[in-house]
Structure formats: structure tokens, C-alpha cells
Image (spheres, helix red, strand yellow):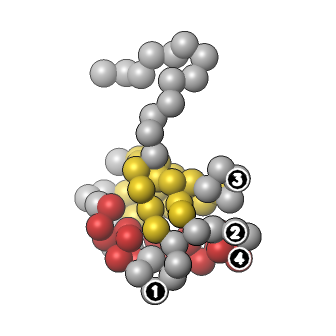
């Protein structure tokens, strides 16, 4: 599964590294690619839910919310 989340609270590259390290430690996560601008993360893995990801960030000032899928350039999402 590949999921896109918005990350709240990041202000610098150190924040990016902390989020990536925390999310990569979650069982089932195979990849966590974090960007500062825009503040998002793409998480790949098996059976990973938002609660588990936010639990991994509990000791930080960051949190995740599902990022809306944006229709870019008139491309329709697959169903």
C-alpha cells in the first residue's frame, strides 16, 4: 500500500529527518519519504494504519493527517 499524508509541525530539515526516522521504525513500513515543502510524507508498507504512524510520532511535535488526492491536469483517478 502507498499512502500520502500531510505532516503538521515541521519547520526544517531536522524535522524531516525526525519524522522519517520515526515512521521508518513502524512495523510494516518499507519506505517513508518526507518532504518539507509541501509538508508531506509518502508511506509504503503492509497493514500500516494512521494510528500506528501517529503513535510513532507521539514523542515529537508532529502529526499526520490523510492528504487529499488532487486531480492534476484533468487526469482522472483510477477506480
Q: If you read the primary sequence from the N terminus, does the residue marked by circle 3 or circle 4 appear first?
A: 4
Front residue of 74/26: it is: 74
Find numbered disc 2 in the image and state the secondary structure of the residue it sits on.
loop
Furthest toward the right, the residue is 13
* Residue displayed at 33% across by 61% down: 50
Q: Which mark, by number, is residue 11?
A: 2
Q: Is residue 26 above or below residue 72?
A: below
State the separation of the CA atoms marked 4 and 2.
8 Å
Q: Read off the residue under disc 4.
A: 14
Distance CA(mark 4)–CA(mark 1): 15 Å
Mark 2 packing: few (<14 Cα in 10 Å), some, or many (20+)?
Answer: few
What crowding class fits label 1: few (fewer than 14 Cα within 10 Å), some (14-19), or many (20 or more)?
Answer: few
Quarter placement of the C terminus? top left
Q: What residue is pinned by disc 3?
A: 37
Q: Which residue is mark 1?
A: 59
| Label 2 or label 3, whichever comes before in sequence order | 2
Q: Residues within 10 Å of mark 4 (few under 14, many from 20)?
A: few
Q: Is residue 52 above or below residue 32?
A: below
Task: Name the spot of residue 22 as percent of width and height, x first.
Answer: 49, 77
| Mark 3: secondary structure | loop
In this rendering, would 45 be left or right of 7? left
Alpha carbon separation for disc pair 1 and 3 = 23 Å
- What kind of element bears circle 1? loop
Amino acid at each position: 500500500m502507498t499512502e500520502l499524508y500531510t505532516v503538521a509541525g515541521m519547520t526544517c530539515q531536522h524535522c524531516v529527518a525526525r519524522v522519517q526516522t520515526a515512521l521508518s521504525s513502524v512495523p510494516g513500513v518499507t519506505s517513508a519519504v518526507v518532504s518539507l515543502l509541501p509538508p508531506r510524507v509518502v508511506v509504503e508498507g503492509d497493514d500500516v494504519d494512521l494510528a500506528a504512524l501517529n503513535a510513532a510520532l507521539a514523542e515529537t511535535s508532529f502529526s499526520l493527517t490523510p492528504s487529499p488526492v488532487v486531480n492534476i491536469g484533468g487526469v482522472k483517478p483510477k477506480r
